[in-house]
Image: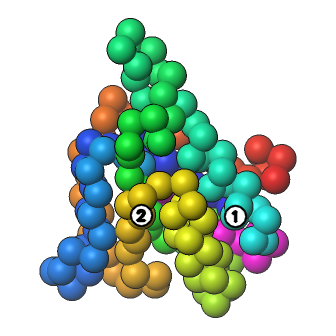
């Protein structure tokens, strides 16, 4: 599982001109899954993300977690995180998870996030989406479950 995590002042996702998810201060998470990912992988990824201390404290140090600042989460599915660009100029997406499996994990991630945070919103799996954000910092992290040992 891969996640691009952006600390944001606000973010929203629109589908066909309608806003389907919107948050203020918190995390925008672009999430990709592959077939070997499990519910346990998803749980560990969410727990890691929600415990990250990347918000500034009163001294300007990145020392506060999402819960500490009353932050929110917007999760957007993104199979393109598994693009393979090694050969040629057209990315291959064969490493991206089967859509049914990836959607199940995406929905589970949304529910797991709700265990940590009051406001959790998402995009629409498989839809053409427009994502808008005001990145705070900017502060962006790339998390890969394999690199984290999940």
Q: CA distance from mark 1 to mark 2?
A: 16 Å
Q: Position of residue 120 (x, y in %)?
A: 42, 63
Above or below for 23 versus 64: below
Q: Quadrant of residue 113?
A: bottom right
The magenta segment is 29-37
The correct choice, above or below, for 69 with respect to 145 in the image is above
- Residue 110 percent across, percent down from the top left: 52, 69
Residue ID at (38%, 68%): 121
In the image, 104: left or right of 56?
right
Q: Nearer the viewer, residue 90 or 96?
A: 96
Structural crowding at the residue carrying mark 1, measured as other residues with C-alpha within 10 Å and reported as few (<14), some (14–19) or many (≥20) = many
- Label 1 vs 2, first from the N-terminus: 1
Q: Nearer the viewer, residue 131 or 61?
A: 61
Question: Percent x, y for residue 25?
Answer: 30, 44
Which residue occupies 38% across, 43% down? 70
Foreground disc of the pair 1, 2:
2
Q: Which residue is mark 2?
A: 120
Residue labelled with disc 1: 42
Under circle 1, the secondary element is: helix
Q: How many marks?
A: 2
On the rendered image, what quadrant is the N terminus found in?
Answer: bottom right
The colour style of the image is rainbow
Magenta span contains residue 138 = no
Name the side, left or right, on which 91 lies relative to 43.
Answer: left
């Amino acid at each position: 599982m891969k996640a691009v995590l952006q600390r944001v002042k606000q973010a929203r996702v629109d589908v066909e001109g309608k806003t389907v998810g919107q948050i203020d201060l918190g995390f925008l998470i672009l999430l990709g899954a592959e077939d070997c990912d499990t519910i346990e992988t998803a749980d560990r990824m969410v727990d890691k993300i929600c415990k990250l201390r990347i918000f500034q404290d009163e001294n300007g140090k990145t020392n506060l977690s999402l819960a500490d600042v009353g932050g929110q989460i917007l999760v957007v599915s993104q199979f393109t995180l598994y693009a393979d660009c090694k050969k040629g100029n057209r990315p291959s997406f064969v490493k991206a998870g089967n859509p049914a499996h990836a959607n199940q994990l995406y929905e589970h991630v949304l529910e797991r996030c709700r265990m940590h945070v009051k406001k959790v919103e998402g995009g629409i799996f498989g839809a053409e989406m427009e994502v808008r954000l005001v990145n705070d910092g900017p502060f962006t992290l790339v998390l890969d479950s394999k690199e984290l040992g999940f």
